Amino acid sequence: MAARTLADARRWTSVGTRLLLNAATGLDETAFAAPSPLPGWTRKHVAAHVAANAEGLGNLLHWAATGEPTPMYASLEERNAGIERGAALGRTELVGWLRNSAVELDAAMSALTPEQWAREVVTAQGRAVPATEVPWLRAREVCVHAVDLDAGVGFADLPAGFLTALCEDVAGRRRTRPGPWVVLTATDSGDRWELPGDGAPAHVSARLPDVAAYLTGRAAALPGAPALPDWL
C-alpha cells in the first residue's frame, strides 16, 4: 500500500466535500431533521459536526501559520454545545455554514507555506502531529460523514485510494485496543489487514468499500466477521 501524500489528502477532501454538500443540499427540512445512522444524531447533527470540524481544523491551521497554540476546541463541552446549536438551525442556514466553513478551511490550507505545513499542532485527541495531517483528518470527516447523511452516498462512491488509507488508519488504531482477532482481505484491491486479538482468527474477504464500512462500524458485521468495538 503506497503511503498517502498531502496532495492525496487534499484531493480526497475536495471529493468528500463535494459529495457531502450535494447530499446535504438535496435534503429538505423534514429529511434533514430525521435520524441519521449515527445513534442519537439527526442528519442536522452530522452536518453541524462537519461544519464545526472545519472551524476546529482551521484553528490548527492558524497554529501552523502563526506558531500561536490554538486548540481545535476550547473544551469537549464547547464542542458538543456547538453541534447542538448547529443542529437547531434551519436547513438553509445549516447548509450555508457547512459550505462556508469548508471554503474557508480550503483557503487556509492553500495559504500555508512548506515551512508552516511542517509545524507541529495538537489534535482534539491530544496527538501531536505535523500540520500536513490536517487535510487527512478533514478527508476522513467529509468522506465518512457524507455516507452518514444516508442521502445517496455510499462507501463505493469514495475514491479507492482514500478507502485503502482509511482502512490502514482505522486498522492501526484498532490494533492498540482489545477486540476480536480478524484478518481482512479486500478482494478488489488485494490489500490485507490483521487485527490481532482474542479468540481464533476470523478470516474475512470482501470488497474494499465493504471492508471500510465494517472497520468504521458503518455496516452490520460482514459474513463470518465478528462485531468490532467502536472505532473512535
Image: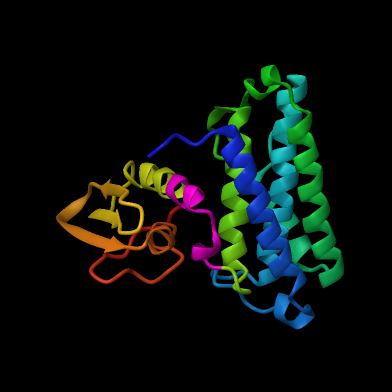
For residue 132, above or below residue 143:
above
- The quadrant in which residue 27 appears is bottom right
Q: Was residue 147 drawn as part of the magenta stretch in this picture?
A: no
Residue 201 drawn at (x, y percent): 16, 55
Compared to 72, does 155 lie above or below? below
Q: Residue at x 59, y 56 (%)?
A: 143
In the rendered structure, the answer to whether residue 148 lies left or right of residue 225 reads: right
Viewer-proximal residue among 52 and 100: 100
For the residue pair 128 and 31, the one nearer the viewer reads as 31
Q: At 54% across and 70% down in the image, what residue appears?
A: 39
Displayed quadrant of residue 19: bottom right
For the N terminus, give its image quadrant.
Answer: top left
The location of residue 180, given as percent across then percent down, is: 24, 56
The vertical placement of 107 against 187, above or below, is: above
Q: Position of residue 16 (x, y in %)?
A: 63, 55
| Residue reaching furthest to the top | 115
* Residue found at x 42% / y 36%: 2
Q: Does the rendering let one see residue 77?
A: no
Report the number of numbered marks.
0
Q: Nearer the viewer, residue 64 or 10?
A: 10
Secondary structure mainly formed by the magenta segment: helix
Q: Give the magenta part as a residue range.
A: 154-165
* Residue 3 as seen in the image, left or right of residue 199: right
Residue 163 located within the stretch drawn in magenta: yes
Q: Which of the 4 image quadrants contains residue 149?
A: bottom right
Toward the left, the furthest residue is 200
Residue 24 visible in rendering: yes
Residue ID at (80%, 38%):
107
